[in-house]
Image: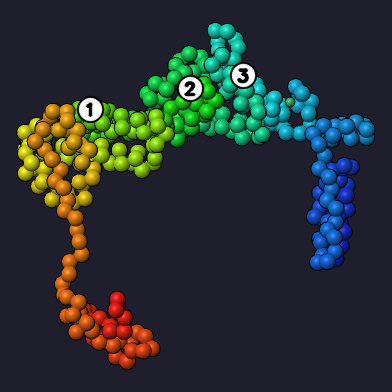
Amino acid sequence: MLPVRHQPARVHHRAEQKHLPGLPHPTPTQPRALPGLPAAPRARVPRPGEQADLRRLRREKPTYSCRQCGREDNCYGRNCGPCTLTERATELLTDPDTGQIHQQLQPIFNALMNVDRPQTTLYWFRRSEGPRILHRMATGELQISHETFEQLPSNKTTNYLRDFLTALGVLPHYEARIERMLPWLEDLLDTIPKSDADIVRRFAQWRVLRHLRQKSAHDQLTKSMVLQGRAQIKGAARFLAWLTRHDTTLAGMGQADLERYLITHPGSETAQHAFIGWVRTSGINTSLRIPKQPRRFSSVTMSEEERWATSRPCSTTKRCATTPESADFSCSCSPNP
Ligand SMILES: [Zn+2]
């Protein structure tokens, strides 16, 4: 064991042995910039292929080179990252009938070949369900269409892949915020009785989704509209469940039942407004109306003269001397306490 004072020199000597010409120095022995002094020049990072030229000049044998293209960087197993990505993407997107990349999926292949980090895409190939869906599309097991994604579970993976295909023009444009409501709607309908589900489905299709699609066609769709549409659908299902619990139906209920529901469910007027309007226009029950809410004004409990008569100075400002003794106390220091 060398003395402690010799260890930095030994580390520096080993680092010098590993140092290759043209490469950045491997040890952190670069002098640091001092205040007032210019920083030391950094070692230039060699370009791809430059390492091979340097080794060829020095007649050194490379430690690694791709078996296909010969590059000595971007190592990924036996081949480099780009060559491995080309091989895997070709296997993934090849149409078995033609032996070529599936014609509709060619934009996907081109996009994958232009990624900055092939390793990231190769990791996506291994870990995600999305590439397996692409392979099933390339082999003809799945149709390349929006209808296929409507049948698949709606999750982050399928939504990303659907947006990816749409962005590259493989699938026609679609309004993601509306289309993603469809699987959500089906999940909701599965949790309620079939008679209620039929009514909610009709309301969602002919009132809520139609309205949202009209807004989308005029480029006026907002996130709050989508959230409101979901709230209207959930409110309709909740209202029908309440009717069932009170032994009545949508067609047989009266205005008194509706008002009783609104009283016992404060704040539901907004969500029920669209549903009751659709119930009336669709002819299911034409007698229902959402009662108009009276405008609320602030109630005046005392006149201006009474208010000034009960006011006294307080200690909240430097001009005041006394302390308020009750909650309804008002200070005479300010006309608007
Ligand atoms: Zn290669």
Q: Is residue 129 above or below residue 91?
A: below
Q: Residues within 10 Å of mark 1 (few under 14, many from 20)?
A: few
x, y percent for residue 131: 53, 26
Q: Residues within 10 Å of mark 3 (few under 14, many from 20)?
A: some
Q: Is residue 237 visible?
A: no
Q: At 36% from the left edge and 89% from the top edge, which residue is drawn?
A: 319
Q: How is the image coloured?
A: rainbow
x, y percent for residue 317: 37, 85
Spatial CA distance of label 3 from label 1 is 45 Å
Local SS, label 2: loop
Amino acid tagged 1? Arg
Please identify the quadrant where the N terminus is shown: bottom right
Residue of label 1: 202
Q: At 81% from the left edge and 66% from the top edge, which residue is drawn?
A: 35
Q: At 33% from the left edge and 89% from the top edge, which residue is drawn?
A: 320
Spatial CA distance of label 2 from label 1 is 28 Å
Amino acid tagged 3? Thr
Q: Is residue 33 visible?
A: yes
Q: Which mark is residue 310?
A: none
Amino acid tagged 2? Leu
x, y percent for residue 297: 20, 61
Q: Residue furthest top?
A: 97
Q: Quadrant of ligand 1?
A: top right
Q: Which mark is in front, 2 or 3? A: 2
Residue of label 3: 90
Residue of label 2: 171
Marks 2 and 3 in Cβ contact (< 8 Å) = no
